[in-house]
Amino acid sequence: MKSTLSSLALLLVGATMGVAQAQTKSPSSSGIYTCTTTDGRRLTSDRPIPECQAREQRVLNSDGSVRKMMPPAMSPEEQSLADQRKRLEEVQRAAQQDAVRRDRNLLQRYADLAAHQRAREAALDDIREAMQLSEKRLQALATERKPMLDELEFYKGKRVPVKLQHQLDMNDASATAQRESIDNQKAEIVRVNRIYDEELARLKRLWAGAAPGSLEKPGTLPATAKPPVQASPASGR
């Protein structure tokens, strides 16, 4: 019985010492912070030093070697610039990823110039066909209008019948709509050709060996209010 109690006592003592050691080591595990205040005082603490928020602080290991350098806290203006820079970097990173995907898709879709030209012609054929239908419809409207104009000759200087005037107005409206449609289709042909021209210029550079995503021009990031503090060589970075 006494032997058992002795063993338990030893276990409790060992556990207590382990906890105490852990508590003793815990402050230093995060490093030792040291800095010099504006009035020349040298301060040391086991956590970041409030008096040195606007100054650089060194974080030391338990043996006194420098673990890292902690830069001064940013002013509101500096923090705003840093946040803006971070947002722009995220936007640029997303744009770069999109450019890589787009270039890879282009290369997968068009292995050579002939493949790209076939796709261009297929896209233009649909527009050309629609434009031909509009032109045919415009010709048909002109044919339909001729007997109306012949009939209108009988009513020179007289009141035109409501029915005939209505037919002429409807014919005019339909012809105007077809002309507008033809103008839109011509503009669409120009737009499609411009898209394929831009694609082809990009593809030529990719076919020549440019890496996907490398053709984008990076945007300009805002300058920070002050240069970042370089880590000390002793920090191991």
Image (cartoon, grey):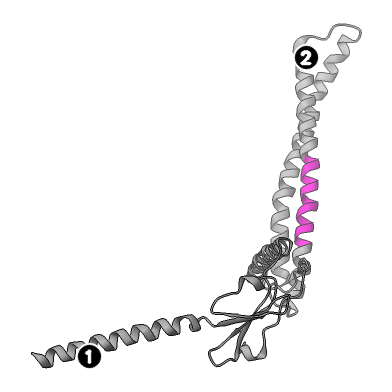
Image coords of residue 109 (percent x, y): 64, 68
- Answer left or right for 61 relative to 79: left
Q: Find numbered disc 2 in the image and state the secondary structure of the residue it sits on.
A: helix
Image coords of residue 32 (percent x, y): 56, 83
Is residue 121 positioned above or below 173 on the image? below
Q: Front-most of 50 and 76?
A: 50
Residue lying farthest right? 157
Give the residues in magenta: 182-197
Residue lying farthest top? 158
**Dot 1 amino acid type:** Leu
Q: Find numbered disc 1 in the image and state the secondary structure of the residue it sits on.
A: helix
**Dot 2 amino acid type:** Leu
Q: Is residue 164 magenta?
A: no
**Residue named by callout 2:** 164
Mark nearer the N terminus (1 vs 2): 1
- Answer left or right for 26 relative to 229: left
Within 10 Å of the Cα at label 1, are there few (<14), some (14-19), or many (20+) other Cα atoms? few
Image coords of residue 84 (percent x, y): 70, 62
Q: Front-most of 171 and 10?
A: 10
